[in-house]
Amino acid sequence: MVAGLLFLGLAGVAIYRVLPLLNPEVSMLAPLDPDCDLRAGPCRGDFPDGGRVVFGIQPDSIPLLEPLQFEVRVVGLEAEGVEVDLQGLSMNMGFNRPKLSPLGQGRFSGEGMLPVCVRDAMEWEAKVLIHTDDGLRAAPFRFITVKDGASPAVQ
Amino acid sequence: MPRYPRLLTPALVMLLLVACFGDPASGPRDVNWEQETCERCRMVLSDRDHAAQVRYFEAEQGFRIAVFDDVGCALLWLEKQPWKQDPRTEIWVTDHRNGNWIDARKAVYVTGGESPMGYGLGAQSDPMPGALDFVRAKWQIFAIEASYESHAAHLKERLQDQAAKRKADSRP
């Protein structure tokens, strides 16, 4: 009985600690730019209060299962830390949120990797999470990946 | 005492051990959760309530088992196998209520839930109003897969449109 209660208590604490990590509370969201094409170059997200984030991925072919370099530039904001939350839009691809390193002057950089999926093509959302004194800000950027051999003409 | 019985005894013991611990010709096997990956999509098997396995026969290797993270993956994979009509093939799924392995062909399938690969079927051993039988569940999986393929084709078109725009923009 005591062990059961202890287990439930520990499970509750674990859920309480993990839930904010999986679904962080965002205080301000930049609107999604439907014309963003990360293969053409970095895209920009503008916050309603004037802050701005620029996000880019290298290599711009965005291959699967290969190291990707994420570059973030924050303008008009004091960023304490930056992460990139990578999520499949039509498929839960698990927790994938590389933390970027500060390079100074609002620039952040880090490495990540996209897993391969059984589907030929998949749409992803890279949500740039910016930790500030005023809370967490998020800027979403979407892109499409295609598995090797599925459609060589577009990669 | 003749010599051959002494040699036969260890052989008999070995035979009994194989009979006790060898892979049986029927039934599901234990899954190494969080370690084994789905034969079709290569995702790690972690959801105990939506997993599947297919036991099949290969001429040279005998009975083999492939494991899947979703009954949808199992049936789509099976459909592509040349031996899919072999009557020795068994399909096992976990009951979505308790994780027990049940015969997929005798199970009914509750729709509208969440499953690892999005086919949304929960297998169970007891009948339930509105639940699908195996054949209908299979057709539902194929229909969902067709919609995924259509979505993927649409994504490829968008990607090609983006590529064309980049090419046009790069022209002097």
Image: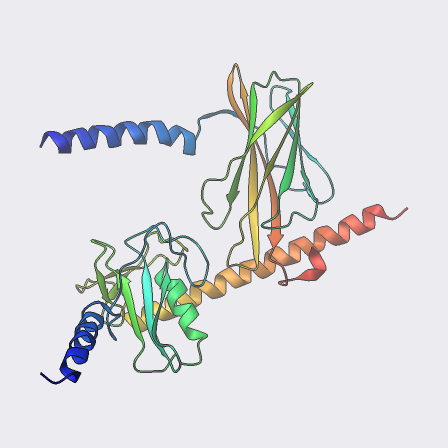
| Position of residue A18 measured from the top left corner of the image (x, y, whole percent) | 36, 31
Report the residue at 29% width, 53% height from top. B48
Report the residue at 44% width, 76% height from top. B81
| Position of residue B100 measured from the top left corner of the image (x, y, whole percent) | 21, 58
In this orientation, which residue lies closer to the viewer: B132 or B52?
B52
Q: Is residue B102 above or below residue A28?
A: below
In this orientation, which residue lies closer to the viewer: B166 or A73?
A73
Taking the image as shown, residue A145 lies to the left or right of residue A5, namely right
Q: Farthest residue toward the right?
A: B172
Q: Quadrant of residue B139?
A: bottom left
Q: Quadrant of residue A84?
A: top right
Q: Quadrant of residue B126?
A: bottom left
Q: Is residue B153 above or below residue A19?
A: below
Report the residue at 16% width, 83% height from top. B3
Total number of numbered discs in the rendering = 0
In this orientation, which residue lies closer to the viewer: A127 or B45?
B45
Q: Is residue B24 above or below residue A96?
A: below
Q: How is the image coloured?
A: rainbow
| Position of residue B99 measured from the top left corner of the image (x, y, whole percent) | 23, 55
Which quadrant is the C terminus of chain A positioned in?
Answer: bottom right
Q: Is residue A43 above or below residue A150?
A: above
Which quadrant is the N terminus of chain A positioned in?
Answer: top left
In this orientation, which residue lies closer to the viewer: A55 or B4?
B4
Report the residue at 38% width, 63% height from top. B72
| Position of residue A144 measured from the top left corner of the image (x, y, whole percent) | 61, 49
